[in-house]
Amino acid sequence: MKLDDGNSLWKEGISFTSYSSQTADYGLSKLKKVEAFSIADLFSLYKDILWDDGNHKYNVSSFVGELDEILLGERFSVLDQDTVDGLIGKLRERGNSNATINRKMAALSKLLRKAYKMGNIHNLPEFRRQKERAGRIRFLDREEEERLFLAVKARCENSYRLCIFLVDTGCRLGEAIGLIWNDVHDHRVSFWITKSGRSRTVPLTGRALESLSGEGARKKGPFSMLNQANFRAIWNDAKAEIGLGTDKQVVPHILRHTCASRLVQGGIDIRRVQMWLGHQTLQMTMRYAHLATNDLDSCVVVLERKSRTA
């Protein structure tokens, strides 16, 4: 180790607490050993601060575990850019789409920002968002909805009520199951615990309001007798029965897509759809904009008029 080589000092995991010309003459008087952490270590330290309990936190735990496994549990106090770029390359080799890579790296970025602020690491690498292709959005038509919901109802009345509520409110599964009765008032429902952290209130359709009745009246909330794992199991059995078992896009979240698609196709403007769904950015809602085909009908009128006069 050389006194005039700052890089070698950082690589040794040592940082200065004091340095002066006198120190240069007589040696390093005060040195502080920097502790190294693995990604898993940092997650254990800050998971409860950065993420609320729930399905999202569970997913982040899985993301962090995979990234830590790729790095072989290596401990560090400086995470260089090559390492971050290498993680992205490994994820792509494993078949991760750019959208999935972005979600995993966003979790890592959030964790590292906290660790940097707390002094656990000494740099923040750049996280470049990968370009995502606009994929096809699958939603249910009315006939598919009817067949699927009837198959669910044959297995569990409460799950059937939940399906109706999900497709007519467009809320997430966790938001619905987490409702309490105080969240329902004056034919409206308020979602307080959301993915974006922003509450929203939407009016209820007649059948969504009716779906709140039943066993839930004696519980903490209308769907509190259900949990996500059991509902998904019932859902998967039902979709297999009606011939959709191999369609990987027919998951409970498709009901949120179906709600959004119906709003756009019905002529509701994108801004209102954004508010209804609780999207943080308009860009997220724009995925449904192509369904607003009525907005383009006037273009055909103009083109036909021009063709006749040509």
Image (cartoon, rainbow, N blue to C red):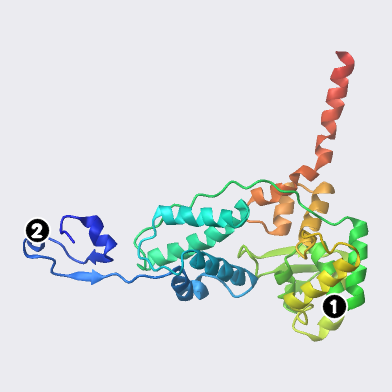
Q: Quadrant of residue 280?
A: bottom right
Residue 98 x %, y %: 60, 51
**Residue at horizontal 72 percent and vertical 58 percent from the top:** 277
Indicate the quadrant containing the C terminus: top left, top right, bottom left or bottom right.
top right
**Circle 1 SS class:** helix
The answer to the question of whether label 1 and label 2 lie on touching residues, with beta carbons closer than 8 A, is: no
Q: Say which residue appears at 16% left-offset and 59% top-offset.
A: 2
Residue of label 2: 21
Mark 1 or 2, which is nearer the eye? Answer: 2
Residue 105 spot, x, y in % from top left: 53, 58
In the rendered image of this protein, does residue 224 appear above or below residue 200? below
Residue at 47% of width from left, 65% of height from top?
A: 111
Q: Check disc 1: other Cα within 10 Å, few if <14, some if 14-19, many if 20+.
A: many
Q: Give the numbered dot on residue 158.
A: 1
**Amino acid type of the residue that numbered disc 2 sits on in the rendered structure:** Ser
- Neighbour tally class for label 2: few under 14, some 14-19, many 20 plus, Cα within 10 Å: few
